[in-house]
Amino acid sequence: MRRFLIRRLSLLLPSVLGVVTLVFLFIHLVPGDPVEVMLGESANLADRVALRSALHLDEPLLSQYRHFLAGLLQGDWGRSIQTGRPVRELVFERYPATLQLAAAAMSFALLLALPLGLIAARYPFSPMTHGALFFALIGVSLPSYWFGPLLILLFSLKFGWFPVSGRGGVGHLVLPALTLGLALSALLTRMIRASILEVIRAEYICAARGKGLSTIRVLLRHALPNALTPLLTAIGLQFGSLLAGSVIIETIFSWPGVGRLILQAIQTRDYTLVQGCLLIIALTYLVTNLLIDLLYGYFDPRVRYGR
Amino acid sequence: MVLLLFAAMVVAAPLLSPADPKTQHLGEGLLGPSRLHPFGQDRLGRDILSRLLYGGRVSLMVSLISVGISLVLGTAAGSISAYVGGWTDELLMRIVDVFMAFPGILLAIALAALLGPSLQNVIVALCAMGWVAYARISRGQILILREMQYVQAAECMGAGFGRILFHHLLPNARAPLIVEGTVGMAGAILAEAALSFLGLGVQAPTPSWGSMLSEGRSYLLIAPHLTLFPGMVLALVALSWNFLGDGLRDLLDVREGTIRSDPFSS
């Protein structure tokens, strides 16, 4: 297990490096002079020179990269151009909100997808299954920026069950998590169903049935764990799309997360802040996938011991 | 399932026949559906139906072009890398990993933010987001196919790299790529609308379904039709493409990617 851990961690390193490099290059991909773009045309020379040297933009690329890396390791992610506050502070202020939203959406998605997928697999040709699969298709086609406002219209404005926006108690979490998790639940339903269908054909399922175990017990105790494990990787990948989707959801529901922060940063051309947000999201994604892989290794010994 | 192929076509076709032009009628803001304006009017009195139609042309064009480019680039990268193997392959896989570390829309948003909002930049952003899928799929296919006997026979007979690729490998690798292409269309349409929704896509006064949804948010309670119709159309089109992809998947017997990417099935 330990060797697997070490191996997997060592794979993480180049990815992290790649991500960091890409984020670093971000400022340099701006067409034109980044400093001019950030400060606008009316900025005076002194400000421009100051910004340029603060961002080390007057130095050769490689030494800028060095500065960037060194800063990251020391916890200095630069300062926001707009507010002057350290980027790291700004980002980590909003980070828990985004994590909360993503976790809630994932939970909702799993809660919905597991029973649906199970039923769809157990009764392959029933109307329930057709309904579930149809729901799955619709779920991935519905744009969140339509579904979200629609939910707001119905449940917040017309019925008044939930608050319209902002972060607060559980009530505030419901609508955003629902919107964000819908597409994921649709996708998961199909994947769970497919996976269970594959697993059901195995001999041990037949044996369990032969022993006289009830359908529920066979499904839940024997089929499901074996079906879910290969899906772990896919779920990890989908977590990334949750993080990405949070940008839109946070905008719609005025949820104070990193997604909304990055959008605001983009609108104000606050590129150092954008870099910080990109970094945290990408790193979260990488770490999540690492954890998922480790979990997979824990559950499935075959993965641990290599090919 | 194939019936919904027609749905996709039907939805796409009317976009080519524009209704009224997108002129403003400033005195008639936010009116609901009426005889003259079947879907109602927006904040500036513009007819929503015709804005939907024009916006549809934009969406269709953007998604077709970006999926097309992604497909070509991704397939080229993936198949060449898989066929040549060695460190070229390793390099590509690392690049793909880095791209995949930025979840979908985020990359598109970052690029669109960087390059400024415009039609071309939306296409660039969507391509950057999409090529990875085609690269992985084509690579997976080619890795399997290149061990086939007919490929080895062709190599023995002296067939060149290009011929093997275009004549033998790619035609047999088509199926999952086509399926991914149709699903990718749905994704591209939604992504373009998302970018426009966030203000990073097509700019006013050019209509786009996403920006229409964004405008509609401010008037949700008093003029829900601003949000209702664009979203419905968007969902329908995406649904049609997804249906199409699904039908094709069943037809071409492509197994869903998750089970395929099993780590211990060599």
Image (cartoon, rainbow, N blue to C red):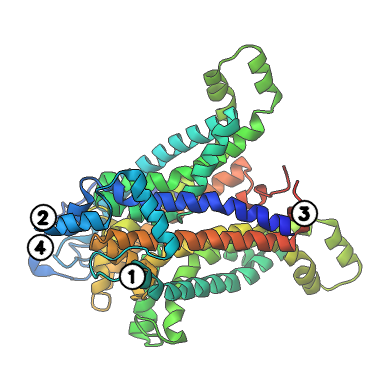
Please identify, in this view, whether the residue under mark 4 or under mark 1 is nearer the observer.
1
Discs 4 and 1 carry the same chain letter: no
| Point 17% across, 58% down: residue | A39
Measured from the top left, where is residue B22 in percent x and y?
16, 54
Please identify, in this view, whether the residue under mark 3 or under mark 2 is nearer the observer.
2
State which quarter of the image contains the N terminus of chain A: bottom right
The mark nearer the N terminus, 2 or 1, is 2
Secondary structure of the residue carrying tag 4 is: loop
Discs 3 and 2 carry the same chain letter: yes
Measured from the top left, where is residue A241 in percent x and y?
48, 60
Residue, disc 2 = A45
Residue, disc 4 = B25
- Judging depth in this view, the residue of A169 and A199 nearest the camera is A169
Residue, disc 1 = A251
Q: Are marks 2 and 1 in contact (CB under 8 Å)?
A: no
> From mark 4 to mark 1, how far is it between C-alphas?
30 Å
Discs 4 and 3 carry the same chain letter: no
* Tag 1: amino acid: Thr
The mark nearer the N terminus, 3 or 2, is 2
- Judging depth in this view, the residue of A35 and A206 nearest the camera is A35
* Tag 4: amino acid: His
A240 left or right, relative to A63: right
Query: In the image, which disc is placed on residue A203?
Result: none
> From mark 1 to mark 3, how far is it between C-alphas?
43 Å
The mark nearer the N terminus, 1 or 3, is 1
Name the quadrant containing residue A75: bottom left
Q: Are marks 4 and 1 in contact (CB under 8 Å)?
A: no
On what subunit does the disc labeled 3 rest? A
Discs 4 and 2 carry the same chain letter: no
Residue B99 in view of the camera: yes
Dot 4 alpha-carbon crowd within 10 angstroms: few under 14, some 14 to 19, many 20 or more: some
Discs 2 and 1 carry the same chain letter: yes
